């Protein structure tokens, strides 16, 4: 397991976009423990996207960011 706190990274990028952490329940959107296991065992090309409200979150091995929702 890496030293990253993926949950906090996701919450932080959503807050940077103006979404208050009380406006959603992340555990209803994604299984954070399963996501951490995927990220820890994935190759450098790994990407996973999921929606939180109006935002699309992109999780990669090295970073988490919000991208335009298509």
Image: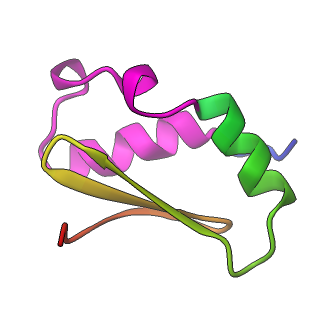
In front: 70, or 18?
70
Residue displayed at 63% across by 38% down: 5
Verify whether residue 8 appears in magenta: yes
Residue at far bottom of view: 45
Give the quarter of the image for residue 25: top left
Instruction: In the rendered view, tell whether residue 22 sits above or below residue 17.
Output: above
Please state which of residues 35 and 21 is positioned toward the viewer in this rendering: 35
- Residue at left offset 39%, top offset 63%: 65
- Furthest toward the front, the residue is 70
- Principal SS element in the magenta part? helix
In the image, residue 30 above or below residue 65: above
Q: How far from the left and from the top, in percent, is residue 19?
A: 15, 39
x, y percent for residue 61: 68, 66
Q: Is residue 46 left or right of residue 41?
A: left
Q: Is residue 64 left or right of residue 31?
A: left
Relative to residue 53, is residue 67 drawn left or right? right
Give the residue displayed 48% in from the left and 34% down from the top.
30
Q: Quadrant of the N terminus?
A: top right
Q: Looking at the picture, does residue 44 appear above or below residue 61?
A: below
Where does residue 14 sit, x and y in percent of width and height? 27, 46
Looking at the picture, the colour scheme in use is rainbow
Judge whether 45 appears above or below 52 on screen. below
Magenta residues (range)? 5-31
Q: Where, quadrant-wise, is the C terminus in this rendering?
A: bottom left
Residue 60 in magenta stretch: no
Q: Residue 3's quadrant in the figure?
A: top right
Q: Is residue 58 left or right of residue 43?
A: left
How many tags in the picture?
Answer: 0
> Which picture quadrant has residue 39?
bottom right
């Amino acid at each position: 397991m890496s030293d990253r706190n993926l949950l906090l990274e996701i919450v932080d990028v959503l807050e940077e976009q103006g979404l208050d952490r009380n406006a959603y329940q992340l555990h209803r959107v994604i299984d954070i423990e399963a996501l951490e296991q995927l990220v820890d065992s994935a190759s450098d090309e790994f990407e996973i996207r999921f929606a939180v409200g109006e935002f699309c979150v992109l999780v990669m091995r090295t970073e988490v960011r919000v991208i335009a929702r298509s």
